[in-house]
Amino acid sequence: MAPSDVSCRIHLSYNRREMAFASDCLQNKVILITGGLGAIGKVIVRKLLAHSARVVVNDIVPEAEAREWMTAAGCAADHCIYVKADVTTAAGAQELVGKTLGAYGGIDVALCHAGMAQSCSILDYPEQDWDRMLRVNLRSAFLVAQAAARAMVERSIKGKIVFTS
């Protein structure tokens, strides 16, 4: 967002640590989020939609489960779509970006939020579980960021790539 585009107004109350934004501050912005149907991802999706963003939610849950949550959350079909794709592979990341472009024509923000955690003693941590965690937490973020960045550059979009952990 260029400084002249910024319509988000931030009001910070130090007593309550509360932030408020204009309800339309993300209007016409397309935001792709991986891990969007996890516990934190759902909260992020709701907040993005509440601020008028068009959101592409990615996760690996079945389509029916995603539709059920999106319906219950009041996600408008013209502002929110679900793309089931395994973004730990280049093909999955490309599929996600391709479907985002097909639905909305561009990407303004790629929010690489997919992640997992597994607690285990280092003495007993299985190598295959460690590899899986690296694929989900690191590789998927790289692949989605790369695919989204390529799409942004091709369309001359000065977008943002955000990594969460």
Image: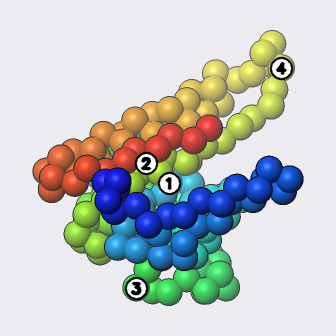
Q: Which residue is mark 3?
A: 78
Cβ atoms at labels 3 and 4 below 8 Å apart: no
Q: Which residue is mark 4?
A: 121
- Image quarter in which the C terminus is found: top right
Q: Which residue does the image show at 84% across and 56% down from the upper left?
A: 16
Q: Which residue does the image show at 48% across and 76% down from the upper left?
A: 24
Q: Residues within 10 Å of mark 2 (few under 14, many from 20)?
A: many
Quadrant in the picture for residue 1: bottom left
The CA distance from mark 1 to mark 3 is 19 Å
Question: As shown in the figure, which amino acid type bears the numbered disc 2?
Answer: Val
Question: As shown in the figure, which amino acid type bears the numbered disc 4?
Answer: Ser
The CA distance from mark 2 to mark 3 is 24 Å
Cβ atoms at labels 1 and 2 below 8 Å apart: yes
Q: Which residue is mark 1?
A: 34
The local secondary structure at tag 4 comes to loop
Q: Which residue is mark 2?
A: 87
Q: Determine if residue 42 is in view.
A: no
The CA distance from mark 1 to mark 2 is 8 Å
Q: Which residue does the image show at 65% across and 30% down from the upper left?
A: 129
The local secondary structure at tag 2 comes to loop
Q: Nearer the viewer, residue 131 or 29?
A: 29
The CA distance from mark 4 to mark 1 is 28 Å
Q: Residues within 10 Å of mark 3 (few under 14, many from 20)?
A: few
Image location (x, y in percent) of residue 139: 45, 34
Question: As shown in the figure, which amino acid type bears the numbered disc 3?
Answer: Asp
In the displayed structure, does residue 99 sit left or right of residue 73?
left
**Looking at the image, is mark 1 or mark 3 nearer the viewer?**
3
**Looking at the image, is mark 4 or mark 1 nearer the viewer?**
1
Of the image marks 2 and 3, the number of the one nearer the N terminus? 3
Of the image marks 2 and 4, the number of the one nearer the N terminus? 2
Cβ atoms at labels 2 and 3 below 8 Å apart: no
Of the image marks 1 and 2, the number of the one nearer the N terminus? 1
